[in-house]
Amino acid sequence: MKTYMAKQGELEQKWLLVDASDKIVGRLASEIAVILMGKHRPTYTPHVDTGDYVVVVNAEKIQFTGNKWEQKKYAWYTGYPRQRTISAADRLEKKPELILSEAVRRMLPKNKLGRAMLSKLKIYAGPSHPHTAQQPEPTELAIKA
């Protein structure tokens, strides 16, 4: 019995459309990360990008549990002495796409392959997207149990 190893460009990558309205950030991000890595396929190969493209719409309607809108802080370094921080509620007003993209980025491998996987994630704040030519399939993720 031989183990199947996928080769680059051998598998056809699908386009999936996800509506993020009223979805929990972490639960949605973990399912998107699995799809981007290709772990949902039986042909998953760790060293090859076998994942699908994911288009997320309505990112401004995403939800956190508990008091994370006020308590969760996003920090970054500007190059000047000190870190800048912003609360999750403020980030939702300014750049709602960054909340989900940061959550997914941190769940992917931290190497060239992970950066290639993240480039297949397209997030839009509103209900429209420019990827209609790719005919993305509507997919329901992070369903509340």
Image (cartoon, grey):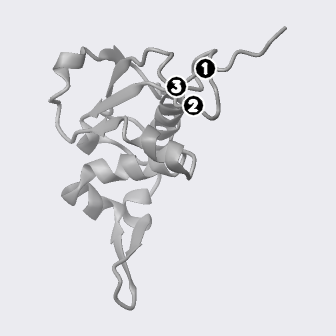
Q: Which mark is residue 6?
A: 1
In the rendered view, does 64 fall on the left or right side of 21?
right
For the point 20% across and 25% down, the residue is 131
Marks 2 and 1, how far apart at CA = 7 Å
Q: Are marks 3 and 1 in contact (CB under 8 Å)?
A: yes
Q: Quadrant of residue 145?
A: top right
Q: Residue furthest right?
A: 1
For the point 38% across and 46% down, the residue is 100
Residue 62, image x and y in percent?
A: 33, 42
For the point 37% across and 58% down, the residue is 69
For the point 51% across and 16% down, the residue is 10
Marks 2 and 3, how far apart at CA = 6 Å
- Most foreground residue, 39 or 127: 39
Q: Which mark is residue 120?
A: none
- Most foreground residue, 14 or 11: 11
Q: Are marks 2 and 3 in contact (CB under 8 Å)?
A: yes
Q: Which amino acid type corresponds to the residue marked 1 in the rendered image?
A: Ala
Residue 123, image x and y in percent?
A: 28, 39
Report the residue marked by disc 3. Answer: 8
Q: Are marks 2 and 1 in contact (CB under 8 Å)?
A: yes
Q: Which SS class for mark 3? A: loop
